[in-house]
Amino acid sequence: MRDRRTLAKLNALHVVQRANKSSAEARLAAAKEHQAAKQEDLRSAGKRTIAAEDDWAEHVASASFSPLHARHFAEVVIERAAAEAAAATELRAAERRAARSEDELRKTLTQVELGKRTRQKVARAVARRTEEASLSELADRVTRSWTRA
């Protein structure tokens, strides 16, 4: 009987583990999506920085060069380069979150697999004991019917 109670508890635990697995998969998908968005932000920031650098270089090379405008263009380049650096930092943070989510998913999958194997082992033990009990009962009936005859 103890094995049957254990099996019932393992079945309940398996349901919880499957829910944890689904949750871990959802967190990983969200982390990957966030990472992709941050990659796109970094690409966009890089393009804006290049455009600002091109505007600055074009102004410096033009015949109507103005130091005041050149300073403004330089400030824009610096501002956009800082935004690009911030986007790169955010991307690295998103990559770390995605890696943690992958690790968490692997851990959860391992726990699910271990629980599944344990549950199968206990289920086999319960089935074996049930079969042994029924065979023993059948053997007792046969023995009683032979002793009566």
Image: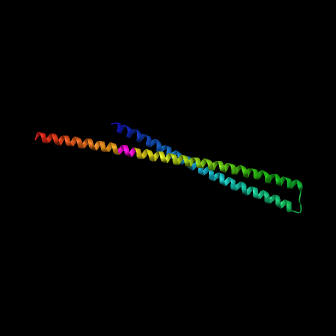
Going 66% across and 54% down the picture, which residue do you hit?
40
Q: Main secondary structure of the magenta part?
A: helix
Image point (68%, 53%), residue name: 41
Nearer-the-camera pick, 33 or 106: 106
Q: What is the image's colouring?
A: rainbow
Q: How many marks?
A: 0
Where in the figure is residue 130, as x and y percent of width and height?
29, 42
Estimate the x, y position of residue 135 in percent, counting from the top left.
Answer: 24, 44
Going by the image, does 115 lie left or right of 147?
right
Q: Position of residue 97 (x, y in %)?
A: 61, 47
Quadrant containing the N terminus in the rendered view:
top left
Does the segment drawn in magenta span residue 14? no
For image coordinates 76% across by 58% down, the residue present is 50
Q: In which quadrant will I find the C terminus? A: top left
Q: Would residue 70 appear left or right of 86 to someone viewing this image?
A: right
112 or 50: which is nearer to us? 112
Is residue 120 on the magenta stretch?
yes
Q: Horizontally, is 148 left or right of 139 in the view?
A: left
| Quarter location, residue 54 | bottom right
Q: Quadrant of residue 58?
A: bottom right
Q: Residue at x 78, y 56 (%)?
A: 52
The boundaries of the magenta stretch are: 119-123
Q: Residue 80: x percent and y percent?
A: 76, 52
